[in-house]
């Protein structure tokens, strides 16, 4: 009973840790507004919205500064949903923020019309990247790219796909969809 209370207490602390300190909120709000204006944004954790996680099992390890979830893990935050077999969150207790979140096993993340699948996804808050490996595929609408590794740079709304000599990068692009998206973004910009 005591261990259960301890784990629940640390889960609450974990949820507080993933929120940035107050001095970062102004910068985050400015970044959110810039992303809305540019039509950017995807596959990133929002520091303002709560994160809801369900799984079959959870462990808090204070010595390693990790919280691990296993078994049919579902993480939901705002319009992003990520499913995996395991999820490990690494946090910095002194700075009270997340450093990395690693999802492993049948990773499937969706946010808006973007979908990312693979065997492993690493969300690195410091580098502001999401790295997808294990037969990774990133889709937006019907457009998709795959390789041995796909890295999404959150602040730049830019992705890089890499091959390894054996597996080449593959892309499927529907020019009509891109044109419609650009026209939609232009129309949204004129309304503001």
Image (cartoon, grey):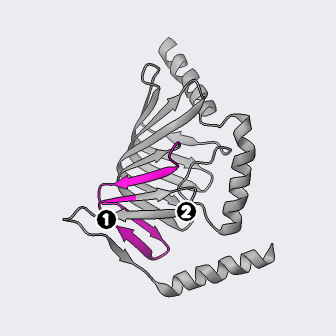
Is 129 situated above or below 10? Answer: below
Secondary element type, mark 1? loop
Q: Position of residue 139 (x, y in %)?
A: 44, 69
Disc with the residue nearer the chain's start (1 vs 2):
1
Extreme residue in the top direction: 2
Main SS, magenta residues: strand
Is 164 situated above or below 47? Answer: below
Residue at the disc numbered 1: 147
Residue at the disc numbered 2: 157
- Tell me if residue 144 is in the magenta stretch: yes
Q: Residue at x 69, y 80 (%)?
A: 186
Residue 31 visible? The answer is yes
Q: Viewer-proximal residue, 150 or 62?
A: 150
> Whole-Å distance between the Cαs marked 1 and 2?
18 Å
Instruction: Estimate how packed mark 2 is, as few (under 14), some (14 to 19) or many (20 or more) residues with alpha carbons within 10 Å.
Output: some
Q: Position of residue 177 (x, y in %)?
A: 53, 83
Q: Viewer-proximal residue, 177 or 158?
A: 158
Extreme residue in the right direction: 192
Instruction: Estimate how packed mark 1 is, as few (under 14), some (14 to 19) or many (20 or more) residues with alpha carbons within 10 Å.
Output: many
Q: Left or right: 87 with respect to 6?
A: left
Magenta-colored span? 126-150
Q: Mark 1 and 2 residues: CB-CB less than 8 Å, in contact?
A: no
Which numbered dot is residue 52?
none
Q: Residue at x 64, y 44 (%)?
A: 47
């Amino acid at each position: 009973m005591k261990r259960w209370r301890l784990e629940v207490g640390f889960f609450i602390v974990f949820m507080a840790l993933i929120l940035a300190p107050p001095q970062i909120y102004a910068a985050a709000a400015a970044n959110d507004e810039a992303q809305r204006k540019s039509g950017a944004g995807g596959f990133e954790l929002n520091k303002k919205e709560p994160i809801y996680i369900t799984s079959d099992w959870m462990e808090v390890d204070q010595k390693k500064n990790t919280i691990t979830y296993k078994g049919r893990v579902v993480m939901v935050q705002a319009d992003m949903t990520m499913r995996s077999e395991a999820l490990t969150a690494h946090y910095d207790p002194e700075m009270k923020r997340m450093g990395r979140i690693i999802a492993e096993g049948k990773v499937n993340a969706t946010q808006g019309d973007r979908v990312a699948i693979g065997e492993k996804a690493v969300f690195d808050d410091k580098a502001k990247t999401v790295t997808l490996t294990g037969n990774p595929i990133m889709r937006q609408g019907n457009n998709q790219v795959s390789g041995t590794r796909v890295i999404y740079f959150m602040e730049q709304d830019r992705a890089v796909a890499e091959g390894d000599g054996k597996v080449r990068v593959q892309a499927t692009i529907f020019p009509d969809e891109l044109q419609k998206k650009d026209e939609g973004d232009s129309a949204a910009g004129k309304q503001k």
